[in-house]
Every structure is written in structure tokens, then in C-alpha cells.
């Protein structure tokens, strides 16, 4: 029983949460479980942008793209497409995508997921208010717009989890039809003939990969030397090579300055004066926190120069009794991190034993084809001397299961601490790398030795066998 339950204190603790995304609704579930009276104020719908316009929709779209990529590569396995291309060896033209139907499914799944979250919260006794809220000091939230405008929710604990929105360029303002943010692509009824993606970070790379697989011609405009500048360099190199081989145009060291629509086309002008013509442009140049006009300063909640809320590893802000979680904190823009921040906030606020947020064991994935999954320390940190470690990299091309599946691109890379052999990180580049990274994450979280990983049985043949093989090779290196 929580030390803050009504039976132990004689009064029920009140929790008010501003924002119903993963940070908010997971916090609400924990607080309700611990006996608090919980209210969530959400503007657009439970699940927030993660469920309605970001992670769930994009990964649903990518699921269709993944099928198309698999079909395109299946001729090597003996699959034939008599109606496609110019010979029975080609899939092109035989299998196509109805993007209107795809987007209908995307939006339907997002709405259904949002409704499932709402039903779960209501089942747990959480009160949900619809509208835009703001802090009224450190002990209440006011709903200032929307269906429940005028409501004031007094609370002993406040959590701010308002997420982020797409960043745009001053001279590339979205119109929702030809110049798009990642929130707007799901209204397309026809597949873009030529999609210009501005931005080569995770979002840009994922959408460029998806629309290329769906059949659009894609030009990826990157201001950096390579795609995915924040990811493992070897992994980014593999992905960029795959992009180019599939026919995507990748423009490195090319900063976009403006995007202008001309009827049914767009012109992207680069800093050096070059232009790129396309039918559509997706602007994917980062995100901004939704922290304006929330009453933060009045409540004594400090923000950074970028507008993110300052929080510690217990999700506390600078104001007593006010916590924050999710993308609005700028800690790590992942739904899993937002959810954990929200849980930690409630465990801490309501007196439960809790560990501080540990980002070193957070695994993340770039959902491209192949996927890129990482956890723990990076090779860049090892190379710079920030971490002491040994590295083994095994190409998937030598893996028996990969050969059977026709997988040519990708690798498993494992890092262990020099001397002790403790697993400190890893990278997997492969189909479904998001699933394959889990044993590495467990090893990092539980501080397993490479021998612990090497001695665990793996199925033969399996892609996960390469994780065990990398661990075996690190044992040899550590001797």
C-alpha cells in the first residue's frame, strides 16, 4: 500500500497532469495504482502526438513500406512476378501501394490506440479533461480553452508532459498539401511522384526510406556530411549506401534555405544557390517543445534557452511539487523515456522506492530498412577515450540465417569494458534490429559479462546468433 493512500494519511493525494502522451498517461496509471486522485488535461486526445501524429502513425506507415521492401528483394529467393517490370524477375510494377488506403489505416489505428488509452485510464478511475491547460501556480491546473474550459484542478502534485511539435524553417512554411511536416503526411491521397525530404536525422531518414520503398522517387537533402549524423558512423554508412543503391538521391552538405510551392510542384533552394524540384517536400528539421503560455515562469519552473523544462533524474523541475516528462524536457526524445520519466515522477512524489533515470541502458531504433538499433556507450565515445572498451563488429553477410533470408547489409557490433569484459553497449543493423537489440540491452542493464552472453544458448540458424558470436570473440580479446 502506498504511504500516501487515504487509509494511511486520512486524505487522498491529488495529482494533476498536463498532457496525455506517454509521459502523462503512464504517470496517471502509476499514480492511480498508488491510490491518488488523478486528473489528466489533454488538448488533442489521449496518447498525444506519439499516438496520434508521430510514432504510431509513422511506424504503421513504415510497416507497409517494410512489406514493399521485402517484396522488392524477394526475387533473389526465387519469387517471380510475371506482371512486373520488363521481365519475370522484377517486382516493380507488379505490386503497388494505395497511399489513400494506407493513410486511412494509419489514422484508424492511431485513433483506436488513443481510445484504448482513454478506456484504460477511465477504468483506473482517472478523470480526463479535454482542452488546453496551463499551470495556476504550483498547486493547480486551469483549462483555458476547449470542451472543459473553465475547469480548475487543484493538486498536491503537478506533472507537465506537453510534448513537442515539428520545427519549421522561416522560408519553408507548411501548407499541408505540398509542403508538409511529419504530422501532415497522413492526409495524402496520392503517392508523391518526387518527394524532397529536408533533414537527414532520424525522422527524415525514416520517411525518406518509407516513401522510397512505397514507390516514390525521393531526394534526401542533408546539411551534414552523412545521413543520421547522431548515430553510429558505421551504421549510417551502411544505410546511406543502401539508399543510394535503391535509387534515392542523397545530397550531403546541402543546407536548404527555402521551399516554395508552384501549383502542383515545389522548389527547394539550397544555401549555395542550387535548386531541387519535386512534387512534394517534407520538412524534417527537428522539434520544438510545446512550453509557451503554460504559466511556467509564474510557477517558478525554469526552462532552457531552447524552451525545454529543466528536470533532474527524478523528473523534478525547479518548482517544488512540479514534475515534468517527455519531449518537453529535452532529455531523450523517445516514448519509452517519456513513459519512464512519468512513472519515476509519480513513484518519487508519492513516496515509493525509485531509482533515478538511467539513460545508459535506453535502447533506441531508427526504423529504416535495415533498422539501426543502439544501446549504451558508443564507438565514438570509446574512440575518444571517454569510455574504455573493446569492440567486435560482425557482418551479417556471414550469418547462416541472413544468407537464407537474402540479407546482405548490416552487422552486429558489441562493446565491452577493457579488462572486465562487462558489456557496455552495442549496435545492430538488420531487419527487425529493434527486436535483436534486446539481449544487448539486458546485458547492459544487468552489467553482464561477455561470457554470460556467449554461454547462453541461441537458436541455429538465427540472426541473434551473431550477438553470441560477437560476445565469444570479445572473450578472446579480453584474455
Image (tube, rainbow, N blue to C red):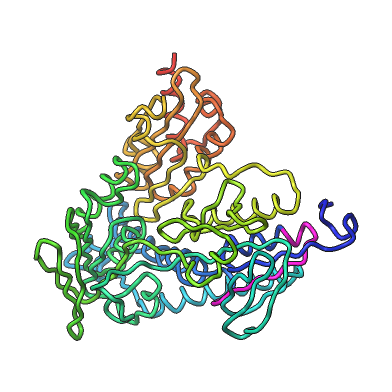
* Image-based side of 248 in relation to 187, left or right: left
Q: Position of residue 237 (x, y in %)?
A: 26, 44
Q: Is residue 404 magenta?
A: no
Compared across the picture, whether 218 is left or right of 97 comes to: left
Judge whether 423 appears above or below 292 on screen.
above
Task: State the image quarter where residue 403 is shown.
Answer: top left
Q: Read off the magenta span.
A: 31-45
Please provide percent x and percent y for residue 85. 20, 68
x and y percent of residue 81 in the render?
Answer: 28, 65
Task: Give the percent coordinates (x, y) of residue 272.
Answer: 10, 61
Residue 243 lies in what quarter of the image?
Answer: bottom left
Q: Is residue 30 above or below residue 434?
A: below
Q: Residue furthest left?
A: 273
Measured along the vertical axis of the image, is residue 260 above or below residue 413?
below
x 49%, y 45%: residue: 363
For image coordinates 76% across by 70% down, the residue present is 125
Amino acid at each position: 500500500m502506498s504511504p500516501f493512500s487515504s487509509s494511511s494519511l486520512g486524505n487522498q493525494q491529488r495529482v494533476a497532469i498536463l498532457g496525455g502522451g506517454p509521459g502523462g498517461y503512464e504517470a496517471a496509471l502509476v499514480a492511480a495504482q498508488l491510490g491518488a486522485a488523478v486528473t489528466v488535461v489533454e488538448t488533442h486526445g489521449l496518447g498525444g502526438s506519439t499516438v496520434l501524429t508521430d510514432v504510431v502513425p509513422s511506424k504503421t506507415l513504415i510497416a507497409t513500406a517494410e512489406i514493399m521492401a521485402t517484396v522488392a528483394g524477394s526475387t533473389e529467393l526465387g519469387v517471380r512476378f510475371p506482371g512486373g517490370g520488363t521481365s519475370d524477375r522484377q517486382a516493380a510494377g507488379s505490386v503497388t501501394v494505395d497511399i489513400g488506403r494506407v493513410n486511412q489505416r494509419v489514422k484508424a489505428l492511431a485513433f483506436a490506440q488513443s481510445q484504448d488509452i482513454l478506456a484504460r485510464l477511465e477504468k483506473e478511475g482517472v478523470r480526463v479533461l479535454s482542452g488546453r491547460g496551463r499551470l495556476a501556480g504550483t498547486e493547480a491546473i486551469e483549462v483555458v480553452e476547449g470542451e472543459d474550459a473553465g475547469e480548475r484542478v487543484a493538486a498536491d502534485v503537478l506533472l507537465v508532459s506537453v510534448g513537442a511539435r515539428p520545427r519549421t524553417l522561416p522560408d519553408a512554411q507548411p501548407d499541408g498539401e505540398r509542403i508538409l511536416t511529419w504530422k501532415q503526411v497522413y492526409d495524402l491521397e496520392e503517392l508523391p511522384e518526387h518527394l524532397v525530404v529536408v533533414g537527414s536525422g532520424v525522422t527524415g531518414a525514416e520517411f525518406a526510406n518509407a516513401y522510397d520503398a512505397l514507390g516514390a522517387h525521393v531526394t534526401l537533402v542533408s546539411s551534414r556530411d552523412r545521413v543520421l549524423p547522431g548515430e553510429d558512423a558505421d551504421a549510417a554508412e551502411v544505410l546511406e549506401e543502401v539508399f543510394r543503391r535503391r535509387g534515392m538521391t542523397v545530397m550531403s552538405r546541402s543546407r536548404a534555405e527555402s521551399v516554395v510551392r508552384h501549383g502542383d510542384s515545389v522548389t527547394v533552394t539550397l544555401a549555395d544557390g542550387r535548386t531541387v524540384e519535386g512534387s512534394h517536400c517534407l520538412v524534417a528539421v527537428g522539434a520544438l517543445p510545446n512550453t509557451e503560455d503554460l504559466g511556467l515562469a509564474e510557477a517558478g519552473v525554469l526552462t532552457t534557452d531552447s524552451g525545454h523544462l529543466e528536470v533532474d533524474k527524478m523528473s523534478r523541475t525547479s518548482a517544488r511539487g512540479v514534475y515534468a516528462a517527455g519531449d518537453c524536457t529535452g532529455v531523450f526524445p523517445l516514448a519509452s523515456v517519456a513513459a519512464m520519466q512519468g512513472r519515476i515522477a509519480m513513484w518519487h512524489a508519492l513516496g515509493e522506492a525509485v531509482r533515478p533515470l538511467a539513460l545508459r541502458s535506453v535502447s533506441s531504433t531508427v526504423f529504416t530498412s535495415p533498422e539501426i538499433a543502439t544501446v549504451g556507450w558508443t564507438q565514438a565515445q570509446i574512440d575518444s577515450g571517454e569510455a574504455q572498451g573493446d569492440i567486435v563488429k560482425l557482418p551479417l553477410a556471414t550469418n547462416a540465417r541472413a544468407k537464407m533470408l537474402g540479407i546482405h547489409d548490416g552487422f552486429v557490433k558489441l562493446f565491452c569494458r577493457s579488462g572486465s569484459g562487462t558489456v557496455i553497449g552495442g549496435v545492430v543493423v538488420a531487419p527487425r534490429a529493434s527486436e535483436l537489440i534486446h539481449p544487448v540491452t539486458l546485458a547492459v542493464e544487468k552489467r553482464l559479462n561477455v561470457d554470460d552472453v556467449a554461454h547462453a544458448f541461441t537458436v541455429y540458424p538465427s540472426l541473434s546468433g551473431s550477438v553470441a558470436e560477437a560476445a565469444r570473440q570479445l572473450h578472446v580479446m579480453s584474455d
